[in-house]
């Protein structure tokens, strides 16, 4: 290390010197000293490292107090923010697993606040004055809505499938069609879940065609269940043949083997009435004779994260008794939000307007077109220099969450292009906005789909464009 380099390193102010800067002193009124010191150390370390790695290219401005202080402030703001934060969903994917899936109905949010501020009868039987079960709370309404004899709510649908298999088929065979051995995002793969539950997978048929005789031939002394899995996120088209639930139930009855259907999304509304066919309903599966049905709480149901098992009373009772249920159990917040959401289904029109997931899926195109025009004009308003090309154009939204995979929803999106800023730069700037705005890039345009925007989001987007345009040449 030569002398001039040493002297450059020495130019970096000390932690104590930076702490004395007026702006940092002011910050100490709002942030714990420990956090502020951590941020100062972080920034000084980064500068030292860049000096060592790249001594020639380090600018004197980078080493001076004003720039150091402003970097400390940014680091501090980022480091002390919540890690889980609200974001604006401009992706047009309604049930976006990475963005937290379903938004809760307003009624559910209010109910959560009420129940979380007070003690409650989660596991207390008020009539008998003794210990009760948390599992009674959503059970009655689930049975009322679906016609099932009994129901059990667990942590999520992966847990529901796991618990069902572990309870009814540990060490025994479960027959599944090869066309239904699906992977559902992340790490949920039917064959893997099957293995970890202790059940033995018996595959039948081929990827595109499975026949009743395939199941019949596979049934033996070791068969515990026949299982049907909703091939959520993909579709097999062309020369295909699937065994219907009815045919599986007939076989199951003949051999006294229960039939379990993992519906995945688990809709309580028949979407074919709204021009979106193909998604089986929970009521349909119960009526069709499935002995147990499993589905998610936060996909098409539009409630909190949960997994629901419902169907035959004796089988649900066995699941309840499994010690694993304790490990998969839901908390009072989930039960509170789920109960409210389910009650909205007593009146389907109510459900469609009050449950955000259902409302977004069924928003009429004219309404979406109007919204897109409004958002486009709001962005134009802050683009006084007319540096952006802002249009609305037809686009496609998705239901997401592996629901209604065959359907893209006709939408109208706002597209933004700039001669001076690449669409990746726009995308990144909006993603780093507070709150973050999530859009997408398509043919080098930045795209926002208004279908998934919530009240107040338009103003957030307008502000973000305002600062984006003021911050760059
Ligand atoms: C989504 C899905 C699951 C997993 O449900 P989670 O609630 O995400 O745990 C299981 N099976 C099917 C068919 C699914 O679509």
Image: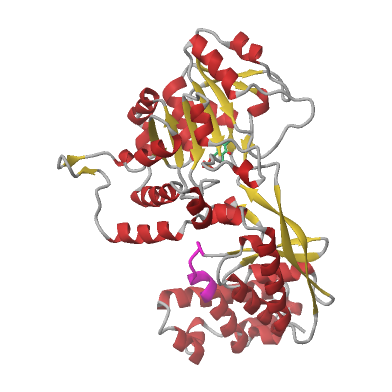
Q: Kindly tell me whether residue 397 is visible in this rendering.
A: yes
Give the residue displayed 40% in from the left and 85% down from the top: 29
| Quarter of the render that holds ligand 1 | top right
Instruction: Identify the residue shown where x is 31% and y is 60%.
Output: 114
Residue reaching furthest to the left: 129
**Residue 17 x/y as whole percent:** 50, 87
Picture quadrant of residue 448: bottom right
Q: Is residue 354 above or below residue 465?
A: above
Which image quadrant is residue 430 in? bottom right
**Residue interval drawn in magenta:** 76-85
Measuring from the top left, give residue 439's x and y in whole percent.
68, 63
Q: Residue at x 41, y 48 (%)?
A: 343
- Visible residue check, residue 449: no
> Is 14 left or right of 388, judged from the image as shown?
left
Q: Position of residue 360 (x, y in %)?
A: 59, 56
Toward the right, the furthest residue is 419
In the displayed structure, 28 sits above or below 234; it is below
Residue in the foreground of this view, choosing between 152 and 167: 152
Residue at image position (54%, 41%) is 267
Asked if residue 174 is positioned above or below residue 462 in the image, the reply reads above
> In the figure, is residue 97 to the left or right of 58?
left
Please give left or right for residue 77 compared with residue 440 in the image.
Answer: left
Q: Is residue 335 magenta?
A: no
The quadrant the N terminus occupies is bottom right
Q: Is residue 82 magenta?
A: yes
Percent position (x, y) of residue 363? Answer: 62, 57
| Of 302 and 325, the residue lying toward us | 302
Question: Which image quarter: residue 433?
Answer: bottom right
Which quarter shows the C terminus? bottom right
């Amino acid at each position: 290390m030569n002398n001039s380099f040493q002297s450059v390193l020495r130019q970096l102010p000390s932690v104590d010197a930076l702490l004395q800067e007026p702006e940092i002193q002011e910050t100490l009124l709002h942030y714990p000293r420990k956090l502020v010191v951590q941020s100062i150390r972080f920034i000084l370390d980064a500068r030292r490292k860049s000096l060592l790695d790249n001594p020639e290219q380090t600018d004197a401005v980078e080493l001076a107090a004003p720039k150091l202080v402003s970097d400390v402030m940014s680091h501090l703001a980022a480091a002390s923010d919540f890690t889980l934060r609200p974001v604006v969903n401009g992706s047009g994917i309604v049930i976006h697993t990475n963005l937290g899936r379903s938004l809760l109905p307003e009624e559910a949010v209010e109910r959560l606040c009420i129940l979380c501020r007070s003690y409650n009868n989660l596991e207390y039987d008020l009539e008998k004055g003794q210990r009760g079960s948390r599992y009674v709370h959503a059970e009655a309404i689930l049975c009322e809505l679906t016609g099932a004899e009994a129901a059990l709510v667990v942590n999520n649908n992966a847990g529901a499938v796991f618990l069902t298999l572990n309870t009814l088929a540990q060490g025994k065979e479960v027959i599944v069609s090869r066309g239904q051995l699906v992977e559902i995002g992340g790490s949920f793969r039917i064959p893997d879940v099957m293995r970890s539950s202790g059940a033995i997978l018996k595959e039948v048929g081929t990827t595109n065609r499975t026949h009743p005789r395939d199941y019949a031939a596979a049934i033996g002394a070791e068969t515990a269940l026949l299982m049907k899995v909703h091939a959520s996120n993909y579709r097999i088209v062309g020369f295909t043949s699937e065994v219907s639930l009815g045919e599986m139930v007939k076989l199951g009855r003949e051999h006294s083997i229960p039939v379990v259907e993992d519906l995945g999304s688990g809709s309580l509304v028949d979407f074919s009435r709204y021009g979106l066919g193909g998604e089986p309903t929970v009521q349909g599966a119960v009526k069709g004779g499935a002995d147990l049905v499993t589905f998610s709480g936060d996909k098409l149901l539009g409630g909190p994260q949960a997994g629901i098992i419902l169907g035959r009373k004796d089988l649900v009772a066995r699941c309840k008794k499994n010690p694993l249920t304790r490990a998969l159990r839901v908390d009072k917040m989930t039960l509170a939000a789920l109960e409210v959401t389910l009650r909205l289904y007593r009146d389907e029109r109510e459900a469609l307007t009050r449950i955000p997931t259902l409302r977004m899926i069924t928003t009429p195109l004219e309404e979406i077109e109007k919204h897109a025009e409004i958002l486009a004009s709001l962005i134009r308003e802050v683009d006084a220099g007319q540096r952006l090309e802002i249009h609305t154009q037809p686009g496609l939204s998705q239901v997401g969450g592996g629901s209604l995979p065959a359907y893209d929803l006709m939408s109208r999106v706002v597209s933004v292009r700039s001669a001076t800023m690449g669409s990746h730069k726009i995308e990144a700037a909006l993603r780093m906005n507070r709150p973050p705005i999530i859009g997408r890039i398509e043919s080098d345009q930045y795209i926002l789909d208004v279908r998934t925007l919530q009240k107040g989001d338009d103003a957030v987007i307008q502000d973000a464009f305002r600062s984006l345009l003021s911050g760059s040449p």
